[in-house]
Image: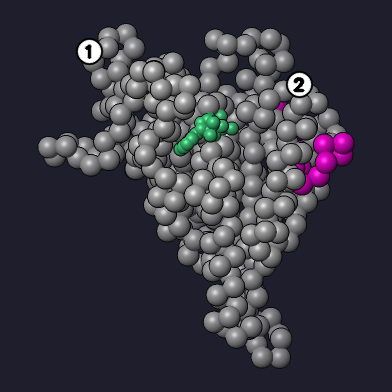
């Protein structure tokens, strides 16, 4: 079981060009100091600077390809060896979570998710070819969101939603979302069609509720099934593993901005699930046996920290002063990101 917590600072947006940059990253040790540090001024005393260490830090100039190659590509092999991989984008709304996970339409702007799928399809095809057809690789997708602690299928149109969402059931020591759809996908184009439609479902559903998609966690699950056969087609072995990519709800302190009743109920659900998530990440990082993954729906469905999995948490940060307090609380939330 392993976890990496890395920080990514997004570039300035056009409307921010005149703004004050207050977040710095130091990927390489200066004068023998610690590596992988994010630095930010103390809001109460600007002469003082706080430093937080990570397993990796990525500055404003980091491309989508660089981030993927450094933090995700190395785990694709493990996925095909049967390990689950779980990738989180954590951070305040507007810091680049969706950009990191989904990314833009242009090839170079593509985020972690389409790149992951592209690598999975490529590796799967190569395995089938290398084994002269005695290995079969299937890729199936599920995509759901957790809003107010309820699970909704994103591969189904919003009209099919029930107010209570999909129920969970325990079976074979795992938590299943009852009725969650799963679609087989054969190539990247196939995937993109499904993904675009599902993201549209997400927008439509949240508009209907007069909510915002930044208030829910969006979880994409890629199930990779490998079957080994003999020459007459008898199944010799089967192996299944999943890669999950999660665009988390915004971690901002909502009490400061919008405190309508609806929003407060949402905030409580978001805070609880993000808190449990950070507790799980900390427990995994410390090598503890007991991971409190059952304490929230999301970590429970993900079986976070079970099955020898690999977890990567990408903490997204905005570089400018207008995010100062939110950035500081983001940096503090995971004690894995140690203040030094
Ligand atoms: P979030 O999902 O955390 O609310 P977004 O991914 O929507 O944040 O990012 C906010 C804005 O910043 C968007 O306009 C997005 O295109 C832009 N952005 C975020 N990260 C980057 C990046 N690494 N490079 C260029 N633009 C980025
Ligand atoms: Mg977003």
266 shown above or below 110: above
Q: Is residue 241 above or below residue 259?
A: below
Dots 2 and 1: beta carbons under 8 Å? no
Crowding at dot 1, Cα within 10 Å, few <14 / some 14-19 / many 20+, comes out as few
Is residue 162 visible in this depiction of the protein?
yes
Label 2 element class: loop
Which image quarter: residue 204?
top right
Would you identify the image quadrant in which residue 224 lies? bottom right
User: What separation in Å lies between label 2 and label 1 (alpha carbons)?
Assistant: 43 Å
**Relative to the observer, which residue lies in front, 193 or 56?**
193
Quadrant position of the C terminus in the picture: top left
Magenta residues, start to end:
148-160
Whether residue 312 appears in magenta in the rendering, the answer is no
What residue is at 37 percent from the left and 39 percent from the top?
61
Can you give x and y, in whole percent of width and height, for residue 273 in the image? Answer: 59, 30
Residue denoted by label 1: 47
Residue 270 position, x and y percent, is: 61, 26
Residue at label 2? Answer: 210
Residue 184 placement, left or right of 188: right
Question: Is 151 situated left or right of 113 in this image?
Answer: right
């Amino acid at each position: 079981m392993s976890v990496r917590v890395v920080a990514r600072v997004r570039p300035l947006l056009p409307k921010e060009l005149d703004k004050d940059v207050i977040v710095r990253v130091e990927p390489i040790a200066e004068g023998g100091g610690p590596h992988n540090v994010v630095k930010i001024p103390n809001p109460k005393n600007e002469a003082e600077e706080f430093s937080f260490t990570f397993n990796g830090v990525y500055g404003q100039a980091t491309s989508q390809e660089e981030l993927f190659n450094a933090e995700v590509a190395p785990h694709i092999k493990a996925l095909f060896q049967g390990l689950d991989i779980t990738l989180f984008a954590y951070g305040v709304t507007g810091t680049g979570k969706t950009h990191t996970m989904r990314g833009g339409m242009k090839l170079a702007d593509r985020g972690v998710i389409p790149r992951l799928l592209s690598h999975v399809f490529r590796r799967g095809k190569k395995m089938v070819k290398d084994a002269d057809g005695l290995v079969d690789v299937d890729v199936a997708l599920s995509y759901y969101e957790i809003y107010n602690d309820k699970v909704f299928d994103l591969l189904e149109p919003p009209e099919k939603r029930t107010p209570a969402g999909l129920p969970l059931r325990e079976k074979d020591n795992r938590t299943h979302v009852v009725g969650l759809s799963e679609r087989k996908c054969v190539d990247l184009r196939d995937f993109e069609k499904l993904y675009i439609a599902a993201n549209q479902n997400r927008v439509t559903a949240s508009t209907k509720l007069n909510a915002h998609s930044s208030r829910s966690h969006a979880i994409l699950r890629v199930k990779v099934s490998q079957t080994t056969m003999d020459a007459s087609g008898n199944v010799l072995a089967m192996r299944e593993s999943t890669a999950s990519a999660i665009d988390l709800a915004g971690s901002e302190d909502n009490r400061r901005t919008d405190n309508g009743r609806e929003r407060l109920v949402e905030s409580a659900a978001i805070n609880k699930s993000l808190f449990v998530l950070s507790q799980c990440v900390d427990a995994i990082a410390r090598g503890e046996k007991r991971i409190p993954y059952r304490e929230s729906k999301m970590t429970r469905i993900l079986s976070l920290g079970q099955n020898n999995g690999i977890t990567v948490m990408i903490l997204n940060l905005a570089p400018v002063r207008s995010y100062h307090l939110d950035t500081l609380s983001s940096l503090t939330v995971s004690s894995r990101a140690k203040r030094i």
